[in-house]
Image (spheres, rainbow, N blue to C red):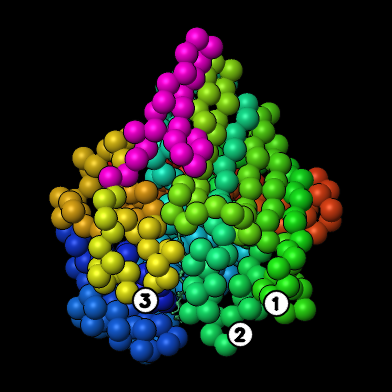
Amino acid sequence: MKIGVIGTGQFAGSFIGLWQLHPDVSEVVATDLVPERAAEHQQRYGLPATYDSTEELLDSDCDAVAVMTQRWTHGEMVLRALDVGKHVYSAVPMAISVAEIEQIIAKVQQTGLIYMMGETSYYNPAVVYARQKIAEGAFGRVFYSEGDYVHDMDNGFYTAYQFSGGEDWRRTASYPPMLYPTHAIGGVLGAVPSYATSVSCIGVVDDRGDGVFDREVSMFDNDFSNMSAHFQLADGGVMRTNEFRRVGHPAGVLESRFRFYGTDAVMEQTSTGAAWSDRDHIEDISELFYTNDGEVDTSAPELAGLDPALVHSFASGTAKVHDRSRLPVEFEGARNGHEGAHHFLADDFVRAVLNKTQPPVNAWLAARFTVPGIIAQQSAHRNGERLPIPDFGDGPDVDLQLFGG
Ligand SMILES: NC(=O)c1ccc[n+]([C@@H]2O[C@H](COP(=O)([O-])OP(=O)(O)OC[C@H]3O[C@@H](n4cnc5c(N)ncnc54)[C@H](O)[C@@H]3O)[C@@H](O)[C@H]2O)c1
């Protein structure tokens, strides 16, 4: 298959490199609004072609596109790609409005095209472990879970938004935390087979005073930098998520972390490790989740131009809980990222397209990872009023065997 990448900013390179290695991908091509960025990626990765515009790329013979543009632009871009018959890989989040999400699901259903959201937390080692334990019934009933995404603005986000937003970067750096909910919710609901039905969310108004989270400046009318949401799940349980952007926490230390409480067992992950317990014993399971990153080779092409505080996300490790047996051998030793997730995500998409079957994080699950955050943001603007969350159903059955169980 041939993949066209739309948006060659700071993140796209990690996936371009992997898809080029994938034995079932014949070509990767690219476009960017800033042509020099596409040209630079062409040179860095030896791409056979770049296109001057998204229109041209969408007109080309690519089978699929990867939408790697800024986080508030995905919905519209994905719909354009589906309209011209392309399979779609989208960076997170799925979209920033419920209407766009509903349209994407409808379009995927009508056309049978493959849609996948690249949620790294789905393959976070703690989530992989919890998913297996829940499937085995080892927790009993999981009645409460927590997923947090803790990423301080001072750890790389100032430079990232400056690169991304140009002169007007402050307008976009105020991006609402709950509109980027998937690294937290996606980890919980990537393991717990349920979905959120209502939410109450509290936002903490920023007080740094540097014009970033300032409603006068913000294109999102947002002044919340830290947010905490409390969800009811359809199975009667509870999910709590935090999205923190002003927090005294070091870069690269488990920015996404998860805890699951069951009637028979508990798994708790913190910044320094993880434990599994039942009524009779507690066990340190940290070593199952460590990704054997070693030293990050900062000369790797994927890392060029990245703020040093973001480089840790692109370490090359895999954790003990990851079963690599279904990955292409060509990925062995290739740069990985986000605690071992990139290899699995890159392969999931190719497998889904070639086998004509929706991937694990398909449009329906992506909606369940994304919509609750959109409604949480609305709840925070209404002082935490509990609001109902729309749901678009389970979607088609996923052949989990094909994706490694
Ligand atoms: N853990 C994760 O899953 C993770 C980590 C990092 C980034 N991301 C996501 O990846 C996406 C890209 O992040 P990034 O840091 O590379 O952003 P970026 O701002 O560095 O890059 C986006 C690029 O898209 C280009 N672009 C924008 N609109 C376009 C259009 N209409 N046509 C062609 N090109 C266009 C921009 O010029 C820019 O070069 C974001 O949505 C982000 O949320 C996810």
- Inter-mark Cα distance, 3 to 1: 25 Å
* Amino acid type at mark 2: Asp
Q: Which residue is mark 3?
A: 305
Q: Residue 41: x and y, percent?
A: 29, 79
Q: Earlier in the sequence, mark 2 or mark 1?
A: 2
Q: Residues within 10 Å of mark 1 (few under 14, many from 20)?
A: some
Q: Report the amino acid beneath label 1.
A: Gly
Q: Choose the circle earlier in sequence order: 3 or 1.
A: 1
Which corner quadrant of the image does residue 306 belong to?
A: bottom left
Q: Would you say the residues marked 3 and 2 are in contact, meaning their CB atoms lie under 8 Å apart? A: no
Residue 84, given in percent of the width and then of the height, sits at 43, 74
Residue on which disc 1 sits: 211
184 above or below 50? above
Residue 94: assigned label: none
Q: Quadrant of residue 33?
A: bottom left
Q: Residues within 10 Å of mark 2 (few under 14, many from 20)?
A: some
Left-right relation of 43 to 165? left
Q: Nearer the N terminus, badge 3 or badge 2?
A: 2
Question: CB of residue at label 1: within 8 Å of ligand 1?
Answer: no
Q: Which residues are magenta?
A: 269-292
Residue 264 or residue 316, whichever sits in front? 316
- For the residue labelled by badge 1, is the local secondary structure a helix, a strand or a loop? loop
For the residues carrying marks 2 and 1, which lies nearer the camera in this image?
1
**Disc marking residue 168:** 2
Residue type at mark 3 is Gly
Q: Which SS class for mark 2?
A: helix
| One can see residue 85 in this view | no
Above or below 347: residue 47: below
Reply above or below: 170 against 91. below
In space, the residues marked 2 and 1 are separated at their CA atoms by 11 Å
The front one of 3 and 397 is 3
